[in-house]
Image (tube, grey):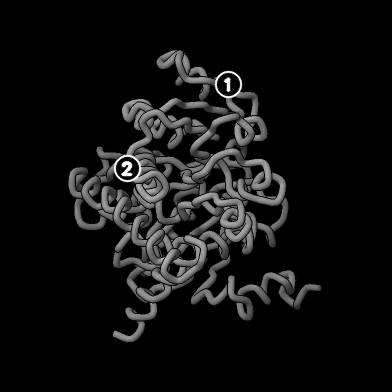
Amino acid sequence: MTDVTGVPGDVLNTLFHSEQGGHEQVVLCQDRATGLKAVIALHNTALGPALGGTRFYPYATEAEAIADALNLSRGMSYKNAMAGLDLGGGKAVIIGDPEQIKTEELLLAYGRFVASLGGRYVTACDVGTYVADMDVIARTNQWTTGRSPENGGAGDSSVLTAFGVFQGMRAAAQTLWGDPTLRGRKVGVAGVGKVGHYLVEHLLEDGAEVVITDVREESVRRITDKHPQVAVVADTNALIRVEGLDVYAPCALGGALNEETVPFLTASIVCGAANNQLAHAGIEKDLEARGILYAPDYVVNAGGVIQVADELQGFDFDRCKAKATKIFDTTLEIFARAKADGIPPAAAADRIAEQRMADARRR
């Protein structure tokens, strides 16, 4: 079913009626001259302006793009709240294959749309967009983070994203094994691209045994050429079944934890950088039923947003790293709340984030 605008009814129902909706504002953007089609979704600005990246992706349909923007922006509200940032949640998607349609003119046009929101939305990098793109967008939009150091930005946010995931993993190890280290543990990393390869470095320095997989052979070789002791398996299906695996770190695309993967996980801990790892509500209960400790993705992967948010006050790497180090304490707090309330860690994290947003609304 569609309404008179041609927008599928299920998308509008999600926006206005479902728990996954509740967004404050959704903006559809089009610039025919450059081929730009974009969606900007602001979920919650109780804590401050909405901050979240711009995803450039060849969605099969416009409805799929809108749904992704709604889902991702909602996740950013929770991520920013749990990261202790005075920022709300937002996300944008540009529809199309960046390899085919991304041009300077398109990015400038997109920047003008973001600027038209007057600072309610602050953008950054995401899948399909990079530091160089943010430098271009910043020419027409002052509310742009993730820029290059030469243009007043922080550069690659993958560094602190990986560092934060490592802190979350240490907290999970503390909770499950009584020691905040991965020394002697076998850790499987699925996806060793922008974030994953930094995570591997942290794990090796900590004394972990590492197994990796990635669809890109060059990403695998970058690690094995430097660290020949790192084992490689063919794909994620093989990785989750590795005998003796202690920790599984999904660091590629979302939906990694689903009905097809959870029953076969050999790991006792799941802690990775990928967004939206739970395919749908209820998967966290399946993990708990199997005795698998899940570190909520939007909590442990918040190092990147902490880094780009710092650009708003003049970037300082040491200050950012100190904030990202606190992901360890935040993750411990979530595990403790989950145990006290008798709920999965994902639900505990949601409760804490929702309370912070509600408190801000009352002020």
Q: What element carries label 1?
A: helix
106 lies above or below 190: below
- Answer left or right for 350 relative to 170: right
Label 2 or label 1, whichever comes before in sequence order = 2
Dot 1 amino acid type: Glu
- Could you tell me which residue is drawn at 40 percent across and 48 percent down? 172
- In the rendered image, residue 20, in percent from the top left (x then y), is placed at 59, 71
Q: From this viewpoint, is residue 35 visible?
A: no
Dot 2 amino acid type: Pro
* Numbered tag placed on residue 180 in the rendering: 2
- Answer left or right for 359 relative to 105: left
Q: What element carries label 2?
A: loop
- In the rendered image, residue 255, in percent from the top left (x then y), is placed at 62, 50
* Numbered tag placed on residue 290 in the rendering: none
Disc number lying in front (2 or 1): 2
**Rendering quarter of residue 14:** bottom right
- In the rendered image, residue 178, in percent from the top left (x then y), is placed at 34, 46
- Residue bearing the label numbered 1: 217
